[in-house]
Image (cartoon, helix red, strand yellow):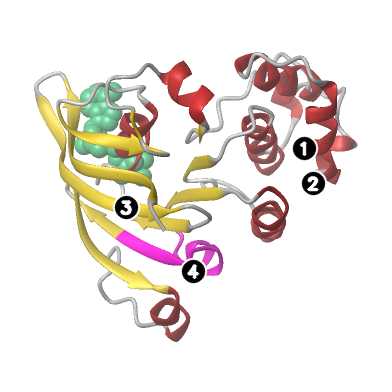
Amino acid sequence: MSALLEVDDLRAGYGRVPILAGVNFDMAGGEFLGILGHNGMGKTTLMRTIMGALPTTAGSVRFAGTDVTKMATHQRSRLGLGLVPQGREIFPTLTVMENLRMGLAAAKSEDRAVMDGVLEDFPRLKRLLDRRGGALSGGEQQLLALARCLCARPKLILLDEPTEGIQLSIIEEMIETLQTLRQRWSLSMIIVEQNLDFITQLSDRVLSIQKGRITGEVDRAQLLSGDVAMTAA
Ligand SMILES: Nc1ncnc2c1ncn2[C@@H]1O[C@H](COP(=O)(O)OP(=O)(O)OP(=O)(O)O)[C@@H](O)[C@H]1O
């Protein structure tokens, strides 16, 4: 099977400070790939560079057979890349419904059926449609950010530290939601995390990142056996 995403010697940074120091990995369509790393190792920088929010200084990103390295974020979105950013970035003064409409607008679609289809998998949000985003709990905001991203019908979602600051009960619900979405939407996902337990429950394979480089990889069998000494240690 040809790769859905091919990241080749990717380099990026802030001003003159290099952060990504040549990142290489591929992922297949339908795969859930974990990326594990401590604070400041370059996880968010990698997600933003793949999405085009940060310019690439060297190397390339191919998505679904197209070289997207020089494409703007909205062009990558249209090809099927979606980012759920760290910190969620929902609109606090807009209602849940209005936040979801923003997801539709990003996809240049007014299709209410798309939103209704997404809400089928988010019963908790369905009960909160008129509540302002800022009045949701952290976990509810995270579900909203994920649902908003889905309104643009992505093929690959980049999920940046979804469990950060979220209580355990919602983390469990999020795992169930992501597993359901995987089956119903034939999605692929990159899950960036520091939470090994969360990543283990969802990923087919986990890469570790340190100082802007991929430094190791474990597969699902190793994850389940607890043999993950190479990870974010
Ligand atoms: N806007 C920015 N300007 C300058 N340096 C930045 C900026 N954003 C991040 N950095 C630096 O880049 C490095 C990598 O940060 P990044 O956010 O990618 O790490 P991370 O692995 O996602 O960490 P965390 O888990 O804390 O979010 C860090 O040293 C950070 O201080």
First of labels 3, 1 by sequence position: 3
Residue bearing the label numbered 3: 26
Mark pair 4, 3: CA separation: 19 Å
For label 2, the residue is 121
The amino acid sitting under disc 3 is Asp
Asked if the residues shown at circle 3 and circle 1 are in contact, with their CB atoms under 8 angstroms apart, the answer is no
Which quadrant of the picture is home to ligand 1? Answer: top left
**197 magenta-colored:** yes
Q: Are marks 2 and 1 in contact (CB under 8 Å)?
A: yes
* Residue at which label 1 appears: 118
Mark 1, Cα crowd under 10 Å, few <14 / some 14-19 / many 20+, is: many
What is the span of residues highlighted in magenta in the rendered image? 193-207
SS under mark 1: helix
In this rendering, which labeled residue sits more in front, label 4 or label 3? 3
Res. 194 visible in picture? no
Quadrant hosting residue 208: bottom left
CA distance separating discs 3 and 2: 29 Å
